Image (tube, helix red, strand yellow):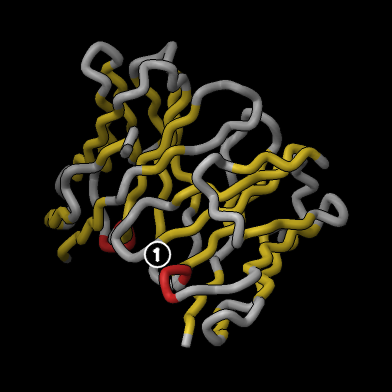
């Protein structure tokens, strides 16, 4: 089945230790997104790639970076995680002007 | 600033009855609205959508109504089934090409057998 796959499902890292979350898709969608969702809050868009073009939301901290080496893969890098970065991170994909398809998320914990 | 609001964090409905989930928005530039359903430990799954040029869209047991003048939309599920128990997110986008979604905080629906 075509889908959006996020690895790992659960990630634990230490305060200040860089961490990378990954997302892959078999849908061949041109747009890929990263969202952060904290408990009882709405998913919040961090950034997205429209094809190869990177689009950062204005309030996304500099601590968060992203890479999209090809159509299928997209990575979220957190350079120096703080306790406030503990959250569920959701990857999504879409074709232009079509509903987004989400992965099952990576729950990040910070020790 | 929350541009999409779901003011009811939870809703309980008896099996077979109608479930009505509500959503309000503030940005008049939104031109496409979506409902996503989320089970525990899974990502949101697209359920149904509506364009701003329509006031109703129906798909089986699910109907979404849009009232643009009130900046309000609702999702009706009838008849409700226990498998519908999940968190429902309302979302909206403005047609700028990148379809950045703005989400509400979700409503947890419990359908009681």
Q: Nearer the viewer, residue B26 or B39?
A: B26
The reply, left or right, for residue A82 in relation to residue A74 is left
Q: Chain of mark 1?
A: B
Residue on which the image places disc 1: B39
Residue at image position (73%, 42%) is: A54
Residue at image position (55%, 36%) is: B100
Residue B19: image x %, image y %?
19, 45
Residue B84: image x %, image y %?
31, 57
Residue at image position (40%, 43%) is: B103
From the viewer's perspective, is residue B99 above or below residue B71? Answer: below
Q: Quadrant of residue A50?
A: top right
For label 1, count other residues whose C-alpha is less than 10 Å away and answer few (under 14), some (14-19) or many (20+). Answer: some
Residue at image position (50%, 23%) is: B94
- State the quadrant of the N terminus of chain A: bottom right
| Mark 1 element type | loop
Q: Nearer the viewer, residue B42 or A48?
A: A48
């Amino acid at each position: 089945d075509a889908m959006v796959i996020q690895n790992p499902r659960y990630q634990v890292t230490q305060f200040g230790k860089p961490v990378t979350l990954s997302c892959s898709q078999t849908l061949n969608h041109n747009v890929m997104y990263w969202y952060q969702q904290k408990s009882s809050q709405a998913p919040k868009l961090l950034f997205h790639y429209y094809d190869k073009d990177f689009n950062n939301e204005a309030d996304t901290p500099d601590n968060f970076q992203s890479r999209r080496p090809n159509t299928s893969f997209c990575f979220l890098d957190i350079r120096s995680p703080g306790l406030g970065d503990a959250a569920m991170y959701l990857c999504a994909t879409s074709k232009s002007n079509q509903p987004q398809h989400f992965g099952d998320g990576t729950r990040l914990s910070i020790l | 600033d929350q541009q999409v609001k779901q003011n009811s964090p939870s809703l309980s409905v008896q099996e077979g009855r109608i479930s009505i989930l509500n959503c309000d928005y503030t940005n008049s530039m939104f031109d496409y609205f979506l409902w996503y359903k989320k089970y525990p430990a899974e990502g949101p799954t697209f359920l149904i959508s509506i364009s701003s040029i329509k006031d109703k869209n129906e798909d089986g047991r699910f109907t979404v109504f849009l009232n643009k003048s009130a900046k309000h939309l609702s999702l009706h599920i009838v008849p409700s089934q226990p498998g519908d128990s999940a968190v429902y997110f309302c979302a909206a986008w403005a047609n700028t090409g990148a379809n950045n979604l703005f989400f509400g905080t979700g409503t947890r629906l419990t359908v009681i057998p």
